[in-house]
Amino acid sequence: MTTTTTKDRAPTGLAQSTQTRGLRPLIRFGDQPLRVLYHHRIASSDGQFTHIDEMVRSLRSLDAEVCVVGPEVHKFDKGHGGSAGWVGLLKAVLPRVLYEIAEAAYSFVVYVRLRRAVARFKPDVIYERYALFQPAGVWVSRRTGVPLLLEVNAPYAIARRRYGGLKLEWLADLCERYTFVGATRVFPVTRVLGEMLIGMGVSAERIVVIPNAIDPRKFEWLPTVDQAKATLGLSGHTVVGFIGFVREWDRLDEMVTWLAQRPKHDSVVLLIVGDGPVRSQLEDQARQLDVAHKVRFTGVLPREEVPAVAMAFDIALQTALVPYASPLCLFEYMALGKAIVAPDQANHHEVLRNGVDCEMYRPQERGSLQAVVQALLDDPNLRAALGRAARRAVKEREFHWVGNAKRVIEAVRDVYPCGGYSVRSQEPDVAAVGRGVDDAV
């Protein structure tokens, strides 16, 4: 684990993140910039680490000093999912119950490292990305009096019980509730998740919803749709696309079956920008149905290359995930100006408007997805209108990382309503990025 230091209300009562357009707030404690100790436990280089990296850069662009404390094994991740390095090895060789005990025991190691970082860096707040069996942030906050801002992307005790075969359920539930209730402010990624947190004992006044986002700079100077298709050898084809790590619950097998039911010389192809554990199954299915030429996988790509490849999409698919998620790819589709097809779920209604910047399907209704896709295939003008509206929504509703950093700043304002806290303003600069140095804890 290393430390990187750099200078540089909803209807239910949940605090909805505010729009802070115009002047750029720069936090000051007296004459000093805000000091944020950012802690995470991510061991992969997937979308999770993208979230961390972008938030740190954006906080620094708003003149905050950020000290990052977290594992370095993500640097060895090849992007194939799961955890890298020794973390992945432990997951592979240990019985699940022993691995969960190791996770919980690791909290004591984290506690010591966080205490050292607090003593050296003297932060104004601790910002932590929530992880299961990880109450160390609450311990340090209570011991030192430094407020804890907790970002919550999922209720992992619930998620792992359902999808990962959780063994120590009682301990997971205990740690999860303790961490949620013990944080000074909690940042769920959706209002749906915020409601779940309230059900676990978190007061609505301490909850601020902050969804996922994009970096606008990475969506500039992209190829045209035709150029992107030509690069992939898909000129003349209509591309239905998906970005992500494909798993069984994405149910893309239904789309492969649908392709096989279409006319033999139909121009529609399915382009999957990513990889996943069911790739071989989908490719086998496509071969058996004689549509292998209509199902394309790019494999794992560097994150910065994804937007240029996804420009080839005519229609972008958002699959039916858990009801509390804030899918990163959804915001990427919006920034690319694509016609989005998304499940009719409450979490998606927080971001999208059915019939305005997307078309929604009923995930429980067989054939609904294919019917909506077909309607968009038949109406290129509607596809274009949906894409334009989606791109506008990203800008108007500040679905970018600097916007999220501003929302964090507003939460800090609530934590420090007086006494040394001040905000000065500067013109917005979403491109500003701080400089950093590494310092081992």
Image (spheres, rainbow, N blue to C red):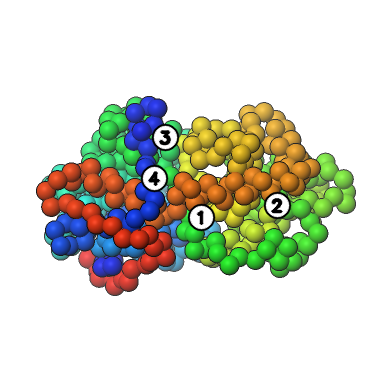
* Frontmost residue, 224 versus 230: 224
When the figure is inspected, residue 225 is found, relative to residue 179, above or below; the finding is: below
For disc 2, the neighbor class at 10 Å (few under 14, some 14 to 19, many from 20) is many
Which of the two discs, 1 and 2, sits closer to the camera? 2
Give coordinates of residue 96: x percent, y percent.
41, 44
For disc 3, the neighbor class at 10 Å (few under 14, some 14 to 19, many from 20) is many
For disc 4, the neighbor class at 10 Å (few under 14, some 14 to 19, many from 20) is some
When the figure is inspected, residue 412 is found, relative to residue 180, above or below; the finding is: below
Q: Of the residues shown, which amino acid type is indicated by label 2?
A: Asp
Q: Of the residues shown, which amino acid type is indicated by label 3?
A: Arg
1 or 2: tag closer to the N-terminus: 1
Q: CA separation, marks 1 and 2?
A: 27 Å
Q: Which residue is mark 2?
A: 314
**Relative to 153, 204 lies left or right:** left
User: Who's the residue at 34% across and 28% down the image?
Assistant: 13
Q: Which residue is mark 4?
A: 19
Which of the two discs, 3 and 1, sits closer to the camera? 3
Which of the two discs, 4 and 3, sits closer to the camera? 4
Q: CA separation, marks 1 and 4?
A: 34 Å
Q: Which residue is mark 3?
A: 191
1 or 4: tag closer to the N-terminus: 4
Which image quarter holds the N terminus? bottom left
Q: Which mark is residue 81?
A: 1
Q: CA separation, marks 2 and 3?
A: 30 Å
Q: CA separation, marks 2 and 4?
A: 30 Å
**Relative to 159, 41 lies left or right:** left
Q: CA separation, marks 3 and 1?
A: 27 Å
Q: Of the residues shown, which amino acid type is indicated by label 4?
A: Gln
Marks 1 and 3: in contact by CB < 8 Å?
no
